Image: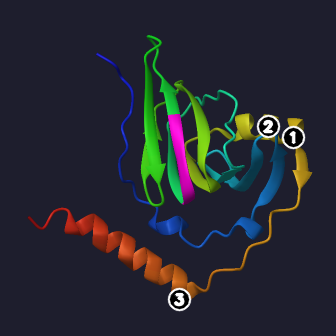
């Protein structure tokens, strides 16, 4: 039996007000890596993947949560036995990838921005990536208003709890 993850919901309530412009940005061959925070307790940010491009194969020593913020994507996740599972995300969908599982992210839309979060210490991995990548300016986007973000937050919570009403 495969130990691959499946798409799921997770709590991102405390992270809703992070803007791309507030992050450190690093150029990737496939787009931009945004780092909002990285310490021994938690690391989080965004990855923006250019249209129809895919990331290099990645892995992490800690489980990671990925939430599709804009556009859509496809995750190919490799378990320890070599089994590959493909999970397609649309805006709002979340996938958890267990520790030490390789994965590749592919953009399936013109705009693809994914929020990522690792609970635990992956700060050394993040620091090594920062040393290898060129710092760049974040792509400019209109700043969201707190009212707009709060409304998105309320709608996301409502849709989550609506599933349990039946």
Q: Could you tell me residue 2's position as x and y percent?
A: 34, 19
First in sequence, mark 1 or 3: give its number.
1
Q: Residue furthest bottom?
A: 147
Q: Secondary structure at mark 1?
A: loop
- The answer to if 73 sits in the magenta stretch is yes
Is label 2 or label 3 in front? Answer: 3
Q: Residue at x 70, y 30 (%)?
A: 56
In what quadrant of the picture does the C terminus appear? bottom left
The residue carrying pointer 2 sits among few (fewer than 14), some (14 to 19) or many (20 or more) residues within 10 Å by Cα, namely few
Where is 79 relative to 48, above or below?
Answer: above
Q: Which mark is residue 147?
A: 3
Q: Secondary structure at mark 2?
A: helix
Task: Identify which residue, 121 or 134, lies in the foreground.
Answer: 134
Q: Is label 2 in contact with label 1 (beta carbons under 8 Å)?
A: yes
Question: Overall secondary structure of the magenta stretch?
Answer: strand
Q: Position of residue 39 (x, y in %)?
A: 68, 48
Q: Is disc 1 in contact with disc 3, using a CB cutoff of under 8 Å? A: no
**Which residue is at a point 56% across and 49% down the rendered structure image?**
117
Task: Verify whether residue 59 appears in magenta.
Answer: no
Q: Where does residue 84 sit, x and y in percent of width and height?
A: 45, 21
Question: Residue 7: which quarter of the image?
Answer: top left
Determine which of the numbered discs, if any, sits on residue 114 in the image. none
Query: SS for tag 3?
Result: helix
Question: Left or right of 24: which side holds 41?
Answer: left
Which residue carries the number 2 mark? 129
Which is nearer the N-term, disc 2 or disc 3? Answer: 2
- The residue under the point 48% across, 60% down is 91
The magenta segment: 70-75
What residue did someone put label 1 on? 133
Give residue 53's position: percent from left, percent from top: 69, 40
């Amino acid at each position: 039996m495969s130990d691959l993850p499946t798409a799921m919901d997770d709590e991102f309530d405390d992270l809703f007000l992070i803007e791309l412009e507030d992050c450190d940005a690093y150029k990737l061959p496939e787009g931009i890596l945004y780092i909002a925070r990285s310490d021994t307790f938690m690391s989080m940010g965004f990855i923006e993947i250019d249209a129809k491009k895919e990331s290099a194969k990645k892995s992490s020593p800690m489980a990671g949560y990925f939430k599709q913020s804009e556009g859509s994507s496809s995750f190919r996740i490799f378990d320890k036995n070599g089994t590959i599972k493909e999970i397609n995300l649309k805006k709002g969908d979340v996938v958890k990838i267990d520790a030490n599982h390789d994965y590749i992210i592919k953009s399936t839309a013109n705009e693809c921005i994914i929020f990522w979060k690792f609970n635990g210490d992956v700060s050394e991995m993040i620091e090594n990536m920062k040393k290898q990548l060129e710092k760049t300016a974040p792509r400019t986007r209109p700043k969201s208003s707190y009212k707009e973000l709060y409304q998105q937050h309320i709608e996301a919570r409502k849709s989550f709890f609506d599933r349990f009403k039946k």
